[in-house]
Image (cartoon, grey):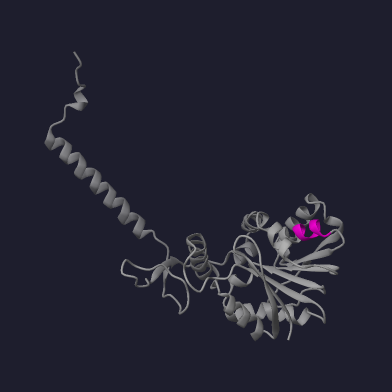
Amino acid sequence: MNRRSPTSRRSPRSASRSRRSARGSSRTRRRRRRAKAPEVAALDPPRGSTWPAGPRGEVKSLQYPRRRAPQDEAGRDPGAAAIFHQAMVELTRGVAPGIVGAIDLGGVRRVVDVGGGHGALLCAILEAHPAVEGAVFDLEHAREGALALFASRGVAARASFVAGSCFDAAPPPADVYVMKSVIHDWDDARSLQIVGKCREAIADGARLLVVEPPAPTARGNATLDWILTFSDINMLVNTGGRERTEAEYRALLEAAGLCVTCVREAPSFFRVFEAVRA
């Protein structure tokens, strides 16, 4: 005959006390977590941004911790810089071949990857075009990783790194300037600074290629809607940036004194906005 252990023979009153004690401990833990919560900023959704809606379709005001932009943190902490740049390499690795296939580099001798980090996109360009040379233009903390990636991908003889801030200095001379996933990091004012510096460098016959996934003007693709909604909020919270529609990218480039000559489709929702001096 099976016998229950002494610890299993508890009265209903004892079990009730145990449940109340567990609930009390849970409430105490929640109160402690709230007491230790970081300072937060209430963020009201800006006009035109994509934000999650409430149960009746209303747009909610959300709260997020105040934090530095990853780019700023990378400049202060070498460990953070390595993590940030490696994340960008991994995000670019899978989409780079499709982007390179969408770009026309006929007759091009030199490409500069503006804000290119460790240069994952530049490496893909140089691998596909053996006659082309290139450089990454980014902050000094990206140099070591970029040179290491050039060597590991076998393009070190044709690739270089030029240190500089795309807000303060024009990139070095090139036939084609490429910027992937840079403009969406910033608001319009900061984005105009970046594009304006590129315009300073663009000579007759040179082009700027802005690679971004434009936000749709209407919902319809569930995957794209989720990705861009998440990215829109992520950019807003971390850097003050935002996702933009194709029309908004065109308007931004034109405001910087450029003329968009075409928009090329690339895999994974990306588009390549090709622009020249107006």
Which residue is at the front of the view, 102 or 93?
Answer: 102
Number of marks in the rendered image? 0
In the image, the segment drawn in magenta is: 123-129
Quadrant where the N terminus is found in the figure: top left
Which residue is at the front of the view, 86 or 204?
Answer: 204
Could one spot residue 141 in this view of the protein? no
Residue depicted at 61% across the width and 60% down the height? 268
Which residue is at the front of the view, 192 or 57?
Answer: 57
Could one spot residue 155 in this view of the protein? yes
Which residue is at the front of the view, 274 or 122?
Answer: 274
Image quadrant where residue 168 sits: bottom right
Quadrant where the C terminus is found in the figure: bottom right
Image quadrant where residue 92 sits: bottom right
Residue depicted at 46% across the width and 71% down the height? 50
Left or right of 54 on screen, residue 220 = right
Left or right of 16 on screen, residue 88 = right
Residue 276, position as x, y percentages in the image: 74, 80
Residue depicted at 52% across the width and 71% down the height? 216
